[in-house]
Amino acid sequence: MVRSAALALLALLAAAAVEAAEPPRRIVSLNKCTDQLLLALVAPERIASVSPIGSDELSFLAEGLKALPSNSGRGESVLLTDADLVLTGPFESHVRRDMLRAQGFAVMVVGLWRTLADGREQIRALSRRLGVEERGEALIAGIDRALAEARDAAPARRSVLVLQRRGYTPGDTSILDELLRHIGLVPHTERLGLAGGGTVSLERLVADPPDYLLMAESDRGAIDQGSALLWHPALREAVPAERRLYLPDRLTICGGPATPHAIRALAAEVRTKVR
């Protein structure tokens, strides 16, 4: 009797261990960037739901994400599901994450990419958790192929400043800084004393302009106060239209499956415009 009970207990423990080691099958994403990574790494039937903005106009893989159920974006909506993994971004509410964990949900926080090394590490960690290491390595290989094609695309070491709405520049807090160097350009942020990112005034830009500006496709014209600085007459004279490079917003918001396309798009802009 005791022996039978012990064997039954061991069997239950073994079954529990196997179940714990099983990759998640009902995955919820609460973040635009994790939406894209998730769709790139797993079969759609394993995705329980994606964020409510997963398939908007700024989303890469929008068409594929439209075919999936969406959640409210709030942790509370997850409580009514049987999700076995919840993916969130770094700015998700700590209270919400703690609430989900307290209710027994497995939660994985997926950070932003500051460097390509960060991105590779993140893809590998996530693909291991999802049980799709081969797909993760394929995504990394795609990024590395695009990098190899784009290396030293610039014909000369010109300076370039990534400039966003209201004069903000991300500096080395995004992978764009690394990509510009890889392509053969010189980020202007160091000269401005903004290597770590920050806001640059119109006066400073006009007094010490870069050779080129890198801007979002959506900022091709001044449509509101946020984009007005980008098209101020003084800045247009300092860095005219032919010395402005553009990238589609949906390629740069998130690191992941969009990254090879962003690298190739940037290299194409550089080869076309930089002299």
Image: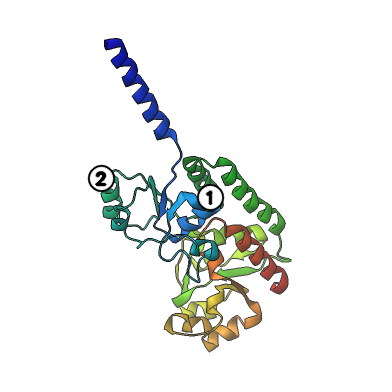
What residue is at 46 percent from the left and 41 percent from the top?
129
Q: Nearer the viewer, residue 139 or 61?
A: 61
Please tell me whether mark 1 sits on a helix, a strand or a loop. Answer: loop
Q: Can residue 60 be seen by looking at this rendering?
A: no
Q: Amino acid at mark 2?
A: Ala
Work out how far the residue at label 1 is from the one at label 2, CA to CA, in angstroms: 28 Å
Q: Quadrant of residue 12?
A: top left
The x, y position of residue 34, in whole percent, is: 46, 55
Q: Amino acid at mark 1?
A: Ala
The x, y position of residue 210, in whole percent, is: 59, 73
For residue 190, side relative to residue 151 (left or right): left
Q: Can residue 237 be seen by looking at this rendering?
A: yes
Could you tell me which quadrant the C terminus lies in? bottom right
The x, y position of residue 214, in whole percent, is: 58, 71
What residue is at 43 percent from the left and 58 percent from the top?
50
Q: How many marks?
A: 2
For residue 238, side relative to residue 78 (left or right): right
Tell me the tag on residue 43: 1
What residue is at 69 percent from the left and 67 percent from the top?
268
What residue is at 53 percent from the left and 43 percent from the top?
124
Please tell me whether mark 2 sits on a helix, a strand or a loop. Answer: helix
**Crowd rating for badge 1 (residues with CA inside 10 Å; few <14, some 14–19, many 20+):** few
Question: Vertical placement of 210 versus 126: above or below?
Answer: below
Question: Vertical placement of 33 versus 169: above or below?
Answer: above
* Residue identified by numbered label 2: 102
**Crowd rating for badge 2 (residues with CA inside 10 Å; few <14, some 14–19, many 20+):** few
Tell me the tag on residue 130: none
